[in-house]
Amino acid sequence: MNEKLYSKYRVAELIGKSLMGTIESDEQAELDRWLQNDEASKLYQDIIDNKKLNDKYEFYQSLSTDKKYNQLQGKINKSIKVKRFRQLMKYAAILVLFLSVAFYWQYRSNEQEQLITQETLNEIKPGYSKATLILADGTEVALDAHKNQNIQSSGVSFIENKDDVLEYKAANDNTLANIGYNTLHVPHGGIYSVVLPDGTRVWVNSASSIKYPEAFVGETREVELNGEAYFHVVKSNKKFIVKTKTLDVTVLGTSFNVSAYDDDDFFATTLVEGKVQLTSEHLGEVILAPNQQGYYKKGLKDIQLNSKINVRNFTSWKDGKFYFEHEPLDNILRKLGRWYDFEVKFEDEKFKNIVFTGVARKDNELRSLMDMIAKTARIDYKAYKNENNTIEIEIFKN
């Protein structure tokens, strides 16, 4: 029996002995220490009230809440035939005390958990235009603090941060001799858009980063992605290549989504229009047509080609929506966690596989989304800050 549960029954035992006049001096001192708490003292007065005691006994006769109750109820039933009414009431008093104290603490515990959950979720606010630009010389620029401003670059290109879009424009007299690389890092709870030097526009999702040159030179246009981004690539004779740790995506001009998070066990490219080639030294090549998805489960040997997909399920995030269709709860909460910046803990691993379908705006408060998921999936949750001061949401049975 854990310590918290033990203390509940210990207090009930002490109160019962006090009422029956069998309490020892050291036990009385222990009870007195507990009664120094105002809430405990009030509970004690409610318990020893004769009228309330009788009312509770009549009510609890119809209940069967735990092992302690059943044991005591059995003693009461046996005592009816062989013991006097006064002795019977002693057992009844103990029974009521056990249940009263246990219910009281359970109520207080639930109430406190609900309060903690509410306060914790109130701290989480949806965001949008949050990102950091890391220049070639290592300078970090917080873009939300430099709205509608030009950003100093190496001289190869002009960088304009306007209307939450970072746009690169080639300088007229650049030498292209020492082209530096910039990195756009988007944290949890953010989305940011960048127009690359060739005019290609990229929407970068939460907890993602993209590295690119200040000007494209040579025979290809190459960028490096960690996380998720949606690309609308400007057509050119130069191939546009998105390099990830898992696979490379090669196109000439097209629109597509790439999901390549390190903490996901999969890689996925979803093609909206045009043609995409997925390439890996170990996995070979796969060509995608519009409305197809190349999906690779990390650790396997083949790239799957999925034709029966709804493209908006994988691209709606850039338009400010969550869209889930028959998706496991584990995947859903991982996506929500990247947006609202929280970690997830499951009481039972089987809850991860609960399938959920729904759509919601990304500017909704997290509590409304969690309530909707909990009601639909028939689970419950609580939110709190763990020992690392990180917000954690625990999923458990309703």
Image (tube, grey):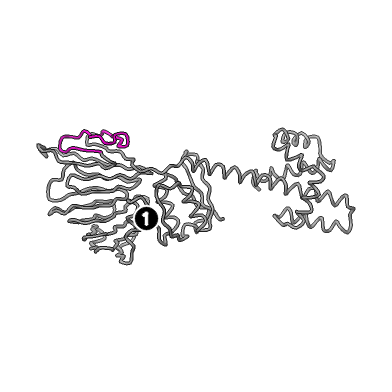
Indicate whether residue 150 is drawn in magenta: yes
Q: Which residue: 18% across, 39% down?
A: 180
Q: How crowded is mark 1: few (under 14 residues within 10 Å), some or many (20 or more)?
A: few
Question: Residue 359 in the image: x percent, y percent?
Answer: 41, 56
Front one among 100 and 347: 100
Q: What stretch is highlighted in magenta?
A: 138-161
The answer to whether residue 239 is left or right of residue 300 is left
**Quarter of the image with the C terminus in it:** bottom right
Question: Residue 174 in the image: x percent, y percent?
Answer: 11, 37
Q: Which residue: 82% across, 58% down?
A: 77
- As drawn, the residue found furthest toward the bottom would be 308
The answer to whether residue 74 is left or right of residue 216 is right
For label 1, the SS is loop
Indicate whether residue 43 is drawn in magenta: no
On screen, 43 above or below 317? above
* Mark 1: amino acid: Asp
Q: Which residue: 33% across, 41% down?
A: 129
Place residue 73 in its image quadrant. bottom right
On screen, 172 above or below 398? above
Total tally of numbered discs in the picture: 1
Question: Residue 4 in the image: x percent, y percent?
Answer: 65, 43
Front one among 260 and 324: 324
Q: Which residue: 46% across, 60% down?
A: 353
Question: Residue 175 in the image: x percent, y percent?
Answer: 10, 37
Front one among 180 and 215: 215
Identify the residue position indicated by label 1 in the image. Answer: 265
On screen, 105 above or below 331? above
Place residue 7 in its image quadrant. top right
